[in-house]
């Protein structure tokens, strides 16, 4: 006899190791590195917890809109972008004296255009975006572990090629906060986000005569039960991710990012195996060189990525949904390999994934974030059609 729908099959064999892992790693980092890094691990764990419970991924949400015109996920993402913009714009504009923060800025050029396009294809073939790959790995999806491995490989290759790409035509960095006063820049940003929100809403309304809500019905579970073991409505996910993104900015002094760490891990591994990286100019200058020369535990992005996976494992255990599937079709492996390589390569060219390039770019008032959105979504359209061609999705009638 199956358990009632309102009962969660709590998995102590998953939850207890996850809690112990988060606690032990935080204590070790606090002792060996800094309390700031330990706090970033906990913030990352909160992000993974929120991502898993709200199933807050860009790849699936974009695919659902492209295939079926359902817009709830995209509306939640636009709401998230609006919330982080509301918090970030005044802070990055220097309204708080003595608070030194750095936004996510990148050139508006060919590199971002091509990189985001490739990333859009990759996240449909690979089955996840940057954040989506990490939280689904934490949820036990073995196929996504394949995607992650080749995500790392693609990131390394992209970092090797990036200097060539950055020499292609570009408008340079364009910041709304440098062009306008921050209140005017914020109003313009919110106006565009609201217009997109209304547009995707009307598309869904026209197709179905209604819109999927961003909230869930109350059901038989208490608020506390739903907070702890999910599932969360995407609205909760947007609010939770916005608050944790703000916490990241204040603690790390820069926006949340994900994929720099992948290139770092892969390059460190290659060097440890005896590979020659002396000609890889990306890793010989600036922060990349500093990060390469010290422990990954000193890198904020790496620490937060570890936290995302651990937080997702905890959430999956509390939800009773940690379910690794060890049988994977060869077709799924091949598309995960191809998707992972495109994700990693594209993210490096585009100066970040859907989080570090798109969300952080928009929240920083950087025009490259809007270019990332347009190009990444276009790539996803192609990726959705490729999924159908490879038999990953059924053709809609």
Image (cartoon, rainbow, N blue to C red):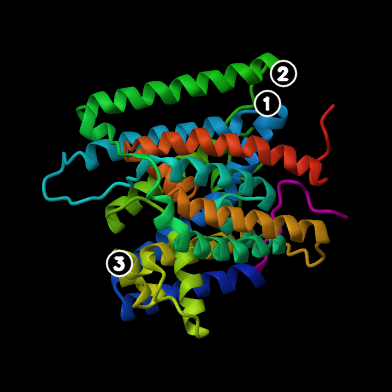
Label 2 and label 1: CA atoms lie apart by 9 Å
Q: Secondary structure at mark 2?
A: helix
Viewer-side label of 3, 1? 3
Q: Mark 3 or mark 2, which has the lower sequence index?
A: 2
Q: Which residues are magenta?
A: 1-12
Viewer-proximal residue among 57 and 5: 57
Residue named by callout 1:
69
Viewer-proximal residue among 370 and 363: 370
- From the top left corner, tell me how far across and down residue 112 is, in percent: 45, 43
Judged by its main secondary structure, the magenta piece is loop
Label 3 and label 2: CA atoms lie apart by 53 Å
Above or below for 273 versus 363: below
Viewer-side label of 2, 1? 1
- From the top left corner, tell me how far across and down residue 101 is, in percent: 23, 50
User: To which quarter of the image does residue 296 belong?
Assistant: bottom left
Q: Secondary structure at mark 1?
A: loop
Task: Give the left or right position of residue 297, taking residue 204 as reference.
Answer: left
User: To which quarter of the image does residue 360 belong?
Assistant: top left
Q: Mark 2 or mark 1, which has the lower sequence index?
A: 1
Task: Give the left or right position of residue 13, taking residue 243 as reference.
Answer: right
Quarter that holds the N terminus: bottom right
- From the top left corner, tell me how far across and down residue 197 is, in percent: 51, 23
Badge 3 density bin: few <14, some 14–19, many ≥20, Cα 10 Å: few
Q: Is residue 5 magenta?
A: yes
Q: Which mark is residue 208?
A: 2
Q: Looking at the image, can residue 348 be seen?
A: yes
Q: Residue at x 72, y 28 (%)?
A: 68
User: To which quarter of the image does residue 65 belong?
Assistant: top right
Q: Which mark is residue 276?
A: none
């Amino acid at each position: 006899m199956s358990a009632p729908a309102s009962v969660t099959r709590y998995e102590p064999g998953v939850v207890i190791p996850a809690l112990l892992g988060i606690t032990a790693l935080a204590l070790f980092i606090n002792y060996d590195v800094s309390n700031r890094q330990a706090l970033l691990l906990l913030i990352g764990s909160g992000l993974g917890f929120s991502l898993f419970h709200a199933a807050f991924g860009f790849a699936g949400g974009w695919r659902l809109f492209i295939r079926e015109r359902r817009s709830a996920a995209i509306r939640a993402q636009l709401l998230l972008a609006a919330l982080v913009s509301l918090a970030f714009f005044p802070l990055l504009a220097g309204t708080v004296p003595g608070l030194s923060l750095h936004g996510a800025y990148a050139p508006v050029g060919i590199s971002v255009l091509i990189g985001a396009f490739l990333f859009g294809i990759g996240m449909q073939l690979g089955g996840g975006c940057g954040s989506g790959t990490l939280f689904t790995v934490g949820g036990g999806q073995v196929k996504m572990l394949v995607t992650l491995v080749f995500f790392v490989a693609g990131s390394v290759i992209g970092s090797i090629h990036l200097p060539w790409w950055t020499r292609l035509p570009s408008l340079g960095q364009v910041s709304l906060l440098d062009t306008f006063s921050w209140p005017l820049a914020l109003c313009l940003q919110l106006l565009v986000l609201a217009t997109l929100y209304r547009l995707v809403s009307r598309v869904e309304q026209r197709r179905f005569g209604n819109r999927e809500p961003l909230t869930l019905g109350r059901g038989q579970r208490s608020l506390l039960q739903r907070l702890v073991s999910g599932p969360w409505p995407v609205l909760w996910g947007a609010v939770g991710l916005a608050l944790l993104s703000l916490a990241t900015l204040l603690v790390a002094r820069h926006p949340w990012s994900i994929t720099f760490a992948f290139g770092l891990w892969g390059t460190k591994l290659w060097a440890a195996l005896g590979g020659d990286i002396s000609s890889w100019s990306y890793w010989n200058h600036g922060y990349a060189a500093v990060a390469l020369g010290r422990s990954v535990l000193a890198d904020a992005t790496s620490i937060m990525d570890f936290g995302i996976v651990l937080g997702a494992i905890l959430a999956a255990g509390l939800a009773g949904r940690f379910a690794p599937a060890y049988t994977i079709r060869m077709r799924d492996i091949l598309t995960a390999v191809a998707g992972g390589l495109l994700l990693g390569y594209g993210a490096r060219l585009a100066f970040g994934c859907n989080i570090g390039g798109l969300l952080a770019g928009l929240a920083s008032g950087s025009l490259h974030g809007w270019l990332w959105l347009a190009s990444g979504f276009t790539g996803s359209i192609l990726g959705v059609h490729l999924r159908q061609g490879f038999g990953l999705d059924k053709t809609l009638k």
